[in-house]
Each structure stands twice: as structure tokens, then as C-alpha cells.
Amino acid sequence: MDTRRWLLPFTYGVDMQAIDAVVSLAESAGTMLVALSLVSVPEAPRSRGARLEDIQQSKDFLEAVKWKASRRQVLVEDHEVFTGDALGSIATLMQDLGCDSMILVSNGKYEVLLHAHELKHLLVEPPDSFILLRLPMPEERPHLGARFLTWLRQVIRQQEETRQVEEPEADIHARSGWGSVSEGEPVPEQERR
């Protein structure tokens, strides 16, 4: 019995939540993952080749997939391809690598594993069958200024609560041996000394 093979293409943005979700899905389906990292090489005649940042992201992606897959005992095969046409390479390599389906990941807001235009193109004109894995939308984190103001309000609120809990002034004087006498009252004998 041949093991099914799912192609997981990557061009941009190592996303550990997406990788974990894909590996988990492959584990539950008993499928081998074929991690394909496509590094963009400009086709211009004076091009200096692939950007170092793109090469590093490619290596990080492949290592992350291998690490997550080993933890879940999912078979993984990894490939790194330098190309000037990522979409054409995905279509060609899907057939050449013997993949049954391709996994595409989206969270509806940010680019996940592929540039947005690449994902859109693959959804509109898929080279073969695909699985679309939709992740939950990420929560919006407030800007640094908003987080600072929230923290400052909490500190001020705690200080106000602390002031309200402090002991009344009369009790403090009573414990320290100090007392107050209204005008016209006789001063007790102890306090005259």
C-alpha cells in the first residue's frame, strides 16, 4: 500500500502555528508531507541571485517542518528549489514528486507560508487537487501606546485603592501615643509632662 503524499509549498513567512496544524492534519490522515521551499531568484540579467533573507527563511521552514514532524512521527521529505517562477515550479514539482494533493494554509488576514498573490492564484487555478486549511484569525494586539496606557491606568487604580485602604489618621495617632485635644478641654495629667 502506497503512502499518500501531500505537497506543502513555501515561499514566505515561517508560521509555526500553520506548520503545527499541517503536521497534525498529516498525522491524523496517515500521510507523508513533502515540504517544498521555493527560493525566489530574480531573472534580471544583472541579478545577484537569491536574497540571503529568503535563503534563511527557506532553511528555517524546512527545519521547522522536520522538527514538528519528528515529534508527531509523521514522515517528511524536504526539497529546496531556487526558481524564478514559483507558481510554475509548484505545478511541475507536484507531478514530479508524485504528490496526491497540495496543502494550502490561510488565516484570512495575513500571508501564511505563501505570498498572498501566490495563494490566490493557486486557489483560482490549482495545478491539481488541494486541501485548504483555514486557521483561526489572529487576535489583534493593541499598539504599544494603547498597551502602555492600559498598564498606566491599572497602576493608578491600584494606588487609589491602596490610599482608600490606609488606616484613618486618628488611629495612627492613638497607636503612636499622640492624641488631640480640642480647645477648652482640660489636658490629661500624662500629656502635661
Image: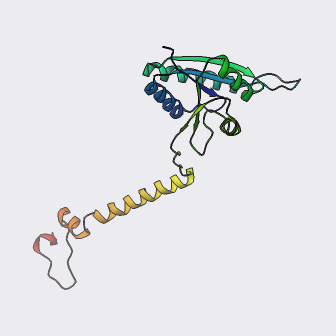
The structure residue drawn at horizontal position 49% and vertical position 30%, both measured from the top left corner, is 20
Q: In the displayed image of the protein, which residue is found farthest to the front?
A: 1
Position of the C terminus by quadrant: bottom left
Q: Is residue 69 above or below residue 184?
A: above
User: 49 left or right of 193?
Assistant: right
Quadrant in the picture for residue 182: bottom left
Q: Nearer the viewer, residue 110 or 55?
A: 110
Q: Residue 71: horizontal and vertical position, in percent?
A: 43, 21
Q: In the displayed image of the protein, which residue is found farthest to the top?
A: 1
Quadrant in the picture for residue 11: top right
Q: Is residue 93 above or below residue 166?
A: above
Q: Is residue 110 visible?
A: yes
The structure residue drawn at horizontal position 46% and vertical position 29%, both measured from the top left corner, is 24
The structure residue drawn at horizontal position 84% and vertical position 24%, both measured from the top left corner, is 47
Q: Nearer the viewer, residue 150 or 165?
A: 150
Q: Residue 172: horizontal and vertical position, in percent?
A: 23, 64
Q: Nearer the viewer, residue 183 or 13?
A: 13
Q: Is residue 105 above or below residue 193?
A: above
